[in-house]
């Protein structure tokens, strides 16, 4: 393995925008991909039987010659990336997937350039297999197909069922390869998240798995109210962070229809809001705030304001589709210019119209806010959007709205043109700041009569 390959993508050994999605150490990424390259290659050569969910996925794909042809094109296009040792065919991909759908996300141990052990938690292992595949023109065509996403959803749902069982807690321990190891906890507690046991509801701190009876129970862990207090709950002009997340973008004067497929990824209200004219019209000229969650983050959604739930909608969509690009831009905070990794993270705006998502419309008690919409956006893996409120429910700031299961995710808050909103310095003065749930993100002033 050449030095060029080993250090292909990272500018430094810390990440902000891609943290939790791509390992901060390229050695860990390369080791993970090397392991799954050999699992795929060896499984194909030995003609090993597939896991039932993977076998069903393969059979369904092979019923669609256009999907088979696009997979062939994907691997031909990925092969053009220089100095890359990765899975080379659909058959090898299937065998690599076998090893993922039968186990929980794990902490991966690798070696640095001096042979010293290093490791990082891999919260989205399936995403790492699909990352470069998605950043191709053929991947763009295939991964947007509704029929393909229905087939993929069936596979991911089967993995999701496993992740709710006790055997899926097997990676929740404090050993070298566990999520509660010293190195793993450093990442779970990074970016101001706080000491794990003092921040989250931990069922049994003395147990190796800390009382979490499945991977999903760990992933959807609750936060202790004292760890995420509401600042000035009596001030109804304040808007609070609905998710523990990294700020991606703020756009004002949003349009009903816009060219979301272009590089600028302008927000298109009609497409975000499930092609509903009446809903979209209410927000034309308003503001959208978007931030995305790392697999290391807390994954429950909180109400950003006091109000009443007007409507909820679940919208089907894609899982691994991205807007293909020429790689990381010059000003990317983490990756070297032109590096093709992480296109999913660079496609956040586009995902508001393409990915599976949840819409929760809230009529704020404060008329200066009025109607707003929370959008939960599933990204990769299973990413189930689980809404836990219903029409007519009254919510207070910080109350639970729902949660993401298993995978990565993003979210957006949409405000109407009547909302005169000013975002906090913590949101605007730093590139991609990481904000805690319930923290102050904005304040509104009196609406003009």
Image (cartoon, rainbow, N blue to C red):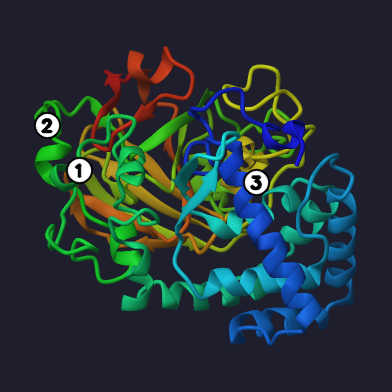
Under circle 1, the secondary element is: loop
Report the side of 165 relative to 209 (left or right): right
Give the mark, 1 or 2, whose residue is nearer the N terminus: 2
Say which residue label 3 marks. 30
Circle number at residue 201: none
Say which residue label 1 marks. 398
Is residue 262 among the parts visible in the rendering?
no
Query: Is disc 1 surrounded by few (<14), some (14 to 19) or many (20+) residues within 10 Å?
Result: many
Report the side of 209 relative to 290 (left or right): left
Say which residue label 2 marks. 233
Residue under the point 38% across and 29% down: 434
Residues at marks 2 and 3, CA–CA distance in whole angstroms:
47 Å
Give the mark, 3 or 1, whose residue is nearer the N terminus: 3
Residue under the point 71% across and 60% down: 37
Q: Are marks 2 and 3 in contact (CB under 8 Å)?
A: no
Is residue 249 among the parts visible in the rendering?
yes
Q: Nearer the viewer, residue 158 or 172?
A: 172
Q: Nearer the viewer, residue 417 or 20?
A: 20
């Amino acid at each position: 393995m050449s030095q060029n390959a080993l250090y292909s993508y990272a500018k430094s050994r810390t990440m902000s925008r891609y943290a939790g999605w791509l390992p901060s150490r390229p050695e860990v990424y390369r080791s993970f991909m090397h392991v799954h390259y050999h699992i795929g290659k060896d499984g194909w050569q030995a003609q090993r039987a597939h896991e039932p969910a993977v076998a069903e996925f393969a059979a369904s794909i092979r019923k669609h010659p256009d999907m088979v042809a696009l997979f062939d094109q994907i691997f031909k296009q990925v092969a053009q990336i220089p100095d890359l040792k990765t899975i080379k065919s659909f058959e090898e991909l299937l065998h690599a997937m076998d090893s993922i759908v039968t186990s929980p996300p794990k902490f991966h141990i690798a070696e640095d350039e001096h042979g010293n052990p290093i490791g990082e938690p891999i919260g989205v292992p399936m995403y790492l297999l699909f990352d470069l595949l998605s950043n191709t023109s053929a991947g763009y065509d295939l991964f947007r197909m509704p029929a393909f996403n229905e087939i993929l959803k069936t596979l991911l749902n089967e993995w999701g069922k496993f992740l709710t069982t006790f055997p899926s807690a097997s990676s929740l321990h404090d050993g070298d390869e566990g999520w509660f190891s010293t190195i793993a906890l450093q990442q779970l507690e990074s970016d101001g998240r706080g000491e794990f046991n003092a921040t989250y509801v931990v069922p049994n701190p003395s147990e190796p798995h800390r009382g979490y009876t499945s991977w999903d129970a760990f992933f959807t862990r609750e936060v202790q109210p004292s760890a995420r207090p509401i600042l000035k709950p009596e001030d109804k002009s304040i808007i609070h962070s609905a998710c523990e997340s990294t700020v991606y973008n703020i756009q004002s004067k949003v349009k009903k229809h816009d060219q979301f497929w272009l590089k600028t990824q302008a927000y298109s209200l009609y497409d975000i809001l499930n092609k509903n004219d009446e809903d979209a019209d209410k927000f034309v000229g308003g503001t959208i705030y978007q931030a995305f969650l790392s697999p290391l983050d807390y994954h429950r959604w909180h109400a950003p304001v006091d109000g009443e739930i007007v409507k909820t909608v679940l919208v089907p969509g894609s899982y691994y589709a991205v807007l293909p690009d020429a790689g990381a831009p010059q000003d990317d905070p983490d990756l070297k210019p032109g590096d093709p990794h992480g296109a999913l993270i660079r496609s956040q705006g586009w995902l508001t119209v393409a990915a599976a998502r949840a819409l929760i419309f809230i009529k704020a008690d404060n008329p200066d806010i009025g109607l707003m919409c929370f959008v939960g956006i599933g990204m990769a893996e299973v990413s189930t959007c689980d809404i836990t409120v219903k029409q007519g429910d009254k919510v207070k700031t910080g109350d639970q709205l729902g949660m993401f299961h298993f995978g990565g995710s993003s979210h957006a808050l949409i405000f109407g043109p009547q909302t005169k909103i000013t975002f906090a310095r913590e949101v605007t003065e730093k590139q991609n700041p990481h904000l805690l749930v319930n923290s102050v993100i904005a304040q509104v002033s009196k609406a003009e009569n």
